[in-house]
Each structure stands twice: as C-alpha cells, then as structure tokens.
C-alpha cells in the first residue's frame, strides 16, 4: 500500500513539473536564443508554423516550430523557424 501511495505522489509531481515546463509563445512576444552564441539576435514571434499531412481523407496537423523575425546589423529583416526548446521568452 505504501508503494502505491508513493508512486501516485511521484506521478503527480512529475505531471506538475511537466505542466510547469511548458512555454507558450504568442505573436508579438520578444524572444532570444537559449544557447550562448555570439551576436544572438533579439527576435519577435511572428506565428506558429504547422504542416498538414493528408492520408486517406484524414488531415493531421503537425507542429514544426515558431517563426521569428529580427533585424540584422545592416537593417535587413530576417525570418526563420525555431524549435520552442531553443527559444527563451524575454518579456
């Protein structure tokens, strides 16, 4: 009986931790790269990127990443898609 209780508590703690680790990004959020790289840009989230795959009249949407936009040092606009694990919300 003690083992079942301990396992239930452990599973509850794991589920709470997973829920707290989720990071959601909305268009307009200011983000940066999580990795420590030189000249890492401060970016603005543009949209969520998904890919639709149809198989025998069934549509499945798969999440590809978050599209971000930033300006280079020369003033050019750059857009690219990043994994959510690679992004860190600044504000």
Image (spheres, helix red, strand yellow):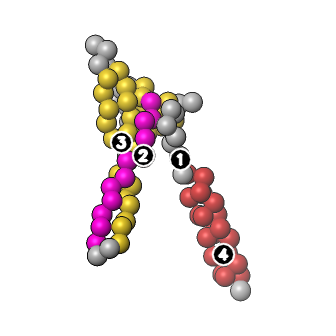
Q: Is residue 38 visible from the viewing direction of this image? A: no
Residue toward you, 55 or 29: 55
Mark 4 Cα shell of 10 Å, populated few (<14), some (14-19), many (≥20) = few
* Residue ID at (28%, 72%): 55
Mark 3 Cα shell of 10 Å, populated few (<14), some (14-19), many (≥20) = some
**Which percent across, then down, holds residue 3?**
66, 81
Q: Is residue 82 visible from the viewing direction of this image? A: yes
- Mark closer to the chain start, 3 or 4: 4
Characterize the magenta stretch by its predominant secondary structure: strand
- Mark closer to the chain start, 3 or 1: 1
Q: Which residues are magenta?
A: 44-55
* Residue ID at (63%, 76%): 7
Residue at numbered disc 3: 82
**Which percent across, then down, holds residue 51?**
33, 55
How far is disc 1 from disc 2 in space, using C-alphas? 13 Å
Let me know if residue 20 is in the magenta part. Answer: no
- Mark closer to the chain start, 2 or 4: 4
Q: Split into 4 quadrants, where in the image is the C terminus?
A: top right
Please, what secondary structure does the residue beneath circle 4 have?
helix
Q: Which label sits on residue 48? A: 2
Mark 1 Cα shell of 10 Å, populated few (<14), some (14-19), many (≥20) = few
Let me know if residue 49 is in the magenta part. Answer: yes
């Amino acid at each position: 009986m003690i083992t079942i209780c301990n396992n239930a508590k452990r599973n509850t703690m794991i589920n709470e931790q997973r829920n707290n680790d989720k990071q959601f990004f909305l268009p307009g959020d200011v983000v940066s790269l999580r990795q420590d790289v030189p000249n890492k840009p401060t970016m603005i989230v543009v949209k969520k990127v998904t890919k639709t795959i149809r198989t025998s009249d069934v549509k499945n949407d798969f999440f590809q990443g978050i599209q971000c936009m930033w300006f280079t040092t020369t003033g050019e606009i750059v857009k690219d898609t990043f994994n959510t694990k690679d992004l860190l919300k600044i504000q």
